[in-house]
Amino acid sequence: MPPMMCDFCKSRPARARVTQREDNGELTRFYACRECANALSYGVISIASAMESGAKVQAAPAEAVEESGGETTCPACGLSYKAFRESMKFGCGRAMGRSGELPALLSQVQAGRHVGKVPPRIRSVLDLEKGIADLRAQIKAAVGREDFARAAQLRDKVRGLERRRDEALAGRRGASTPPKGERQDESPPLTRGEGGDSG
Amino acid sequence: MTLLSDGDFTRCPWLANANGSPFQVVSSRIRLARNLEGHPFSHWAGPRDLSAVAAAVREAVARCSMLSDCEIIPVDKLDEADRLFLAERQLISRELAAGGAERLVIVRRDQRLSLMVNEEDHLRIQCLSPGLALRETWREVNDLDDQLEHYLPYAFHPRWGYLTACPTNTGTGIRCSVMLHLPALVMIKKVNRLLSAVQKLGMTVRGTGGEGTEITGNLFQISNQQTLGVSEVQEVEQLEELVKRLIDWEEEALGQLQKEARSLIEDKIWRAYGILQHARTISSLESNELLSALRLGVRLGIVTNVSVEALNQVMICSGPGHLQKIAGTHLEPAQRDAMRAEFIRERIPLN
């Protein structure tokens, strides 16, 4: 697998990630070599001029230039980003958490989101979480119309569902599973940078 | 009786009884890739995690009713012939065959269901069936997956599905494959049409030995590649549809050949028959090509005293691993070729 190349000069290997916020609020990412990233961050070149050759994006100031080459490693399993790029194999399930970076890479390999089987126990946890979210919305509405008795009733229901969810999670937990609050979908990003497009 | 010490090495049980299946289909296979939460994936895990995963799987297997009659085989204790033998039966991958501590293969007595532990992923669950049987195969592997999930905390993300070491498996983690015999398409040189249809549907073609192997004996292994954005049932249905279309094309090609080159085809079949019945030494490459011609002879009603199942069995059980297991000792390539010729002569009766 050849190294990922800089989106701007297209000749040096990418070492940094450049994030740009589009007008509609969506983030677009580019990968830049150290030189181009520096040029961008000091305004020597703009994304628009840098991308002139094959520009596909609207010109807008780069929001941030982040170094993400070399030393970055997964806080959960210690696999370096470099090693991942070489083997194209994840080191652990944490890579797929809140980090925007690896899912972005994943989408180079495959598109879409999971539509298949959900493990029965996780399905029950997801159902409970959806129920909790619905009840919370109802509580907010009840408080809004100053129906506090109703809000208190709903709050008890939420506590009941939360207890069931925690029990379901505890049932799934093996001896070596991470402690509460560190579930898969809340894992720290593998690379530095903003939490992004996790579902 | 155990699989590797005193089993029947001359007959592969999961290949038996493909009743009513299309003639061109040898076998169907579905495997699921799964990982356990809280441990690095096998390729990146240290000895402690590998052994914790192996222990958790052993414990779960002991509780699964679907695996009440199974054998647990540590791969690093196996010799070369055992590894080849298991690979020829499609019970271990080449990656697992390479071995290492805490690598296990767990095989149910009928060999239809098996698990690979600490391969690229912590767990590979596999079901093999003779003939075209993707739906039944999916049901069975899915049931076993449910049973195992009851005891094993799978790494799963609501958006990305089952988390796997390789991004190409993330999502459903499913790989459905069908082994097809398509000699007529090869003879009329229409394989490109086949390949482009397969690729258009996001599927892939491999040789009989799986990833990275050559196509021999006109046997094509067709399998799905997409695991995100497509459900398991959709994959199964798409592959089944494609297989049916390829079978139609093969039949069409066969009709054309019979019209335009009947005597050439018959000659090819009879020559193959003659060599297989009389050869005193034969390589696996040559025997696969000749068995393919003989199979075509059975299809055309020219060869009547051999069944397709017998040919499938001979094809698998004349591999180097099988022959060494039958002989009970290490064999040099020349010895294997001699033994293969004898093995085939015994099983292909004189017409």
Image (cartoon, rainbow, N blue to C red):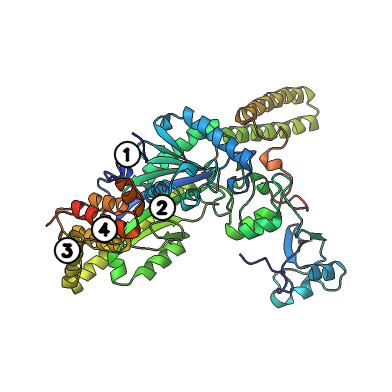
**Is the residue under label 2 in contact with that under label 1 (CB below 8 Å)?**
no
Distance between the alpha carbons at the discs numbered 3 and 1: 31 Å
Instruction: Report the residue at 48% width, 37% height from top.
Output: B145
Q: Secondary structure at mark 3?
A: helix
Instruction: Report the residue at 76% width, 30% height from top.
Output: A142
Q: How many marks?
A: 4
Question: Whole-percent x and y of residue B18?
Answer: 27, 46
Q: Which residue is mark 4?
A: B338
Q: Which-is-in-front pick, marks 3 and 4? A: 4
Q: Is residue B161 left or right of residue B244?
A: right
Question: Whole-percent x and y of residue B187?
Answer: 28, 70
Question: Whole-percent x and y of residue A30?
Answer: 73, 64
The chain letter for the residue carrying disc 2 is: B
Q: Which residue is mark 3?
A: B274
Viewer can see residue A120: no
B96 is higher (above) or lower (below) than A37: above
Q: Secondary structure at mark 4?
A: helix
Q: Which-is-in-front pick, marks 2 and 4? A: 4
Using the image as rendered, state which of residue B71 and residue A138 is in the foreground: B71
Q: Is residue B151 left or right of residue A170?
A: left
Q: Earlier in the sequence, mark 1 or mark 2?
A: 1
- What's the residue type where badge 1 is placed? Gly
Distance between the alpha carbons at the discs numbered 1 and 4: 23 Å
Q: Which residue is mark 2?
A: B177
- What's the residue type where badge 3 is placed? Gly
Q: Earlier in the sequence, mark 3 or mark 1?
A: 1
Q: Which residue is mark 1?
A: B7
Using the image as rendered, state which of residue B328 and residue B129 is in the foreground: B328
